[in-house]
Image (cartoon, coloured by chain):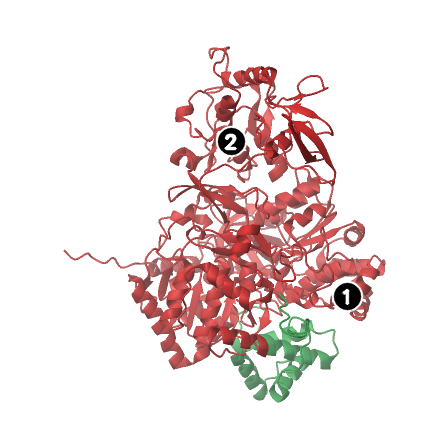
Amino acid sequence: MTQDSPMMSNQDRLIYMANQIARNFGTMDPARAADAVADHIASFWDPRMRAQIFELQGKGDVRLGPVAAAAITILRQSGAPPHQTQATEFNSVSGVGHSDAG
Amino acid sequence: MTFTRETDHGTPPAIVTGKTVCLTIDGQSVTMPEGTSIMRAASLMGGAIPKLCATDNVESFGSCRLCLVEVEGRNGYPASCTTPVAEGMVVRTQTERLKQLRRGVMELYISDHPLDCLTCAANGDCELQDQAGAVGLRDVRYGYDGATNMGQAKDQSNPYFDFDPSKCIVCSRCVRACEEVQGTFALTIENKGFDSKVSPSQGEDFLGSECVSCGACVQACPTASLIEKKVVETGTPDRAIVTTCAYCGVGCTFRAEMRGEELVRMVPWKEGKANRGHSCVKGRFAWGYAQHKDRILNPMIRASVDQPWREVSWEEAIAYTASEFRRIQAKYGTRSIGGITSSRCTNEETFLVQKLIRQGFGNNNVDTCARVCHSPTGYGLKTTFGTSAGTQDFDSVMQSDVIMVIGANPTDGHPVFASRMKKRLRQGAKLIVIDPRRTDLVKSPHVEAEHHLPLRPGTNVAMLTALAHVIVTEKLYDESFIRQRCDWDEFEDWADFVSESSRSPEAIEPLTGVKAEEVRAAARLYATGGNGAIYYGLGVTEHSQGSSTVMAIANLAMATGNVGREGVGVNPLRGQNNVQGACDMGSFPHEFSGYRHVSDTATRALFEQAWGVPLDPEPGLRIPNMLDAATDGTFKGIFIQGEDILQSDPNTHHVAAGLAAMECVVVQDLFLNETANYAHIFLPGSTFLEKDGTFTNAERRIQRVRKVMTPLNGYADWEIVQLVANALDLGWAYSHPSQIMDEIAALTPTFAGVHYDRLEEEGSLQWPANDTAPDGTPTMHIEGFVRGKGKFVVTDYVPTDEKTGPRFPLLLTTGRILSHYNVGAQTRRTDNVAWHPEDRLEIHSSDAENRGIKDGDWVTLRSRAGETTLRALITERVAPGVVYTTFHHPTTQANVITTDFSDWATNCPEYKVTAVQVGLSNGPSDWQQSYEAQAQRSRRIDVIEVAE
């Protein structure tokens, strides 16, 4: 996306979103950050969005930053990693039953 | 419920000291809390000492001298409103001498009051009339020929109430209500003695004055001097039903006072725990939209959006809806449709819409307007504390010593809570405001912020980290709280991060534009000033780092030990009336009710067992993702209940493109809103006055909504969703919303104890309400955080990608104004337009001068996304370099300017930061002209000729 054109294509936007998530995990070491990004995408992205970004990476799209790219690779190869934060974690507070973090 | 006035005990309750005194009133022994007035004590015993200037919403005044009593052993006749009870006191409220004195006082009042009781609008609902009867007044010895204040001109400038000075008894109840309850200080008593009169501002009329039309003065008036126009027009009510306001997240409860099925007035309910008997102009007066001529009352369909609408029967509309959704799924797949729940509808209705999508559509493509407002609150507070909601009740603010308001403008957005906050500030609490604009809270009568940090839009995280830097490096944190309640290792990581010199107030001053010393002083005050409470709004969440900002706020509260008791906490001021409830009810595409992820097998099994179908374990699409998928061709149909995404969501062009790409857009609403321009099926909705249910406000308080009139469209919204569900063969059989709440309670642990009978008993319940907390939970995290240990999260400042530059040198931020609500669909159809008939662009005088712009000029507002025109308002409220506008009017469509940048974690749009340019305009933009033409075409309704 150029500065004069904020209208991203949908594919641009997926790349942008993945990189934006990665930037916000930027204080973590890269391996942990990649897990966190992968967990976030697995928890909040609809399957078609994930499929699209897998496809983009598969086609060699180079716009994904290193952490975002590593995260997509994790998801493609190993599936969702263990949960990283309470926002993606559930059923861990009370042990049995439902944590119902709301 | 028949019509009875709420009991007025004359004076407010005493401040609780725990001590009581015993006394005798009219021969009866009674024990009362220390500090109670004799008037209140007598009232609590069932008596009623005559009174005029006293009412229990304001402090006693002792001016009318009607409430005199005799106290054994004391000289004279003390006013019962200003005399507190005392141990052993013997009081007589009715003696020959008292009767004589009261009649004398009443004679003087009546000698200067019109005797038109039979034709007076307040006949039968007038305290002066009642008290004349109570004191046995039979004649006025002075005659009526002398000088009087009668015959003065009425002030009818306010669209909702009249002021007739001839009927004023100058009791000052209105003046005191304006000061003590509302905190605006718009009214005063002008002149002295016989010439004394109530005056708005400096002798202006009500509309032109500083009056905010909250209605507190009208409610306080004991005569017809201040009276609702609707009462003048209709007559007094004959019954009253308590219900909950459908504007904003404060959740005020009102007595809907009715005559037959006609609503006469909404009067704030004194027992209401959210509003404590107060109201704002919207809830009190702006309900006329419910009967507005623009309401659509018949279902309509059309094959394509370029055709006119065709009115059809409910049966045809529902069958067509079901067949279209099934057709699309058969052609494009299960996940090709979805829906949006409404934060204006009830909990029961939002629960049913998400159930329709999960059970009936077979996917999780459900979202709600919280996507564009407080979704970062859900993410941020869940991550740090373990709950997706605020920590306190509203009463908590009265225990606060330092109040920090970040990115919120409560006097406009949450006015009834703002009045409570201002009351606490007048009592001496200190205020810190972090906001690019000089909001009313920064400086208004008797309120002034100790520190205003007018940061540049988009620098919230840098600012909050700098505050944390001061707290950590100056060792102002609460180590024992942190060690006991939080993860100490995570705290240390966070403390190391914020302590770096690059995050000091001095280092970030060039970014934020706020003087470092002011930031340091604010941090010290928050950390050391006693109970510190943070209140925040959309100026926190609607940023590319909205979720990070929420977590940064939570970090500050944990570091200073300001969580888990009254007077402290982290408090999101939620926007719409039921946005908290809509989130609680499972409106997000990744969660069931109670914030449980769809991938959790145990939770899913619970719902699968209850609903009898397998449920999708994958998260669904968020609203912006739905629009993207629509333009990609994989999302083809949507059911939208009570939301207007074309006006409210960012980047209008993109929203329009997404809607236009769908084959079936169903809109269920009161009006043909902007989104309906792209709809194929319109299902007329019902107002909050026409249905039963519950709303949940910003303090997690679940309150009843009660039907006071028959739905004009024929059905409550929950019934319409049930019709659609059953057309999809789901076999629902709810006959009352209480049954839906029973299902919610059975499936949602935090709501397990919420049932209509309990709500009737308690008036309201704050979740969690279950076996652990049967009476609800006013304050969260008292013993420990819901997640276990509080989690400090490192929140690095990541600048937004929305940059200013030569072409777009100014930053636009958007918001709302007191008289309007959200997209204005309701308030624009009321007399509130008297205050705000159009969106205006606030611009600093220096920026205006540089561009040759004068106040009121038409200007073009242009961003990389689009442009619109509106009139300029030159003001010092915004800093140089920042402009501001509201988004209440579709003729402006402020969201044609906003971009599709959004919060990294939740996709909440970055409404608060858009790089723009402003210049003089020659007229409406091309887009505005073409939009208006398209909207008019789209709203055509075919008139069916009746056969002869």
Q: Are marks 2 and 1 on the same chain?
A: yes
- Mark nearer the N terminus (2 vs 1): 2
Chain identifier of the red chain: B
B212 in relation to B690, above or below: above
The percent position of residue B874, horizontal first and vertical second, equals 58, 45
Q: Is residue B297 left or right of residue B49?
A: left
The percent position of residue B305, horizontal first and vertical second, equals 34, 66
Q: Is residue B891 left or right of residue B318?
A: right
C-alpha span from label 2 to label 1: 56 Å
- Looking at the image, how many numbered discs can be counted on the residues? 2
Q: Residue at x 71, y 26 (%)?
A: B89
Where does label 2 land, which residue? B205
The percent position of residue B251, horizontal first and vertical second, equals 55, 51
In the rendered structure, the colour chosen for chain A is: green
User: Considering the image in quadrants, where does the C terminus of chain B appear?
Assistant: bottom left
Few, some or many residues within 10 Å of mark 2 (<14, 14–19, 20+): some
- Amino acid bearing label 1: Cys
- Amino acid bearing label 2: Asp
The reply to whether residue A57 is visible in this rendering is: yes
The disc numbered 2 marks a residue on which chain?
B
Helix, strand or loop for disc 2: loop
The disc numbered 1 marks a residue on which chain?
B
Where does label 1 land, which residue? B486
Which label lies toward us, 2 or 1? 1
Q: Residue furthest left?
A: B948
